Amino acid sequence: MTKQTKILTGLLAGVAVGTAIALILSSDKNDDLKQKASDWFCDLLNSSKDKLASVSGLVKDKMAKVSA
């Protein structure tokens, strides 16, 4: 992944998180929308944790192979 792609991905992720937080904190009129945004944000966090755990496992395996 190029440096520009990483920057763009980070920027888009930040926009998505900011939008989700803004919707959650917005007025009480949109309870359904806030619930959907909250669920989406929780799903996003859970999938990020899963991906991080997967990458961590790959790094540990590679480090074990290198040091062996």
Image: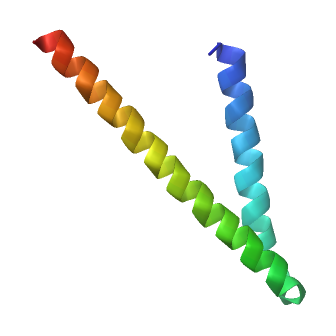
The quarter holding residue 31 reads bottom right
The quarter holding residue 10 reads top right
**Image position of 46 (left or right of 10):** left
Q: Residue at x 79, y 58 (%)?
A: 19
**Horizontal and vertical percent position of residue 4:** 72, 17
Give the colouring mode of the picture.
rainbow
**Image position of 47 (left or right of 28):** left
Q: Residue at x 65, y 24 (%)?
A: 6
**Image position of 14 (left or right of 59):** right
Q: Residue at x 70, y 54 (%)?
A: 17
> Image height check: is 17 above or below 33?
above
**Horizontal and vertical percent position of residue 43:** 60, 61
**Horizontal and vertical percent position of residue 48:** 52, 48
> Image height check: is 63 above or below 33?
above
Image quarter where the N terminus lies is top right
Image quarter where the C terminus lies is top left
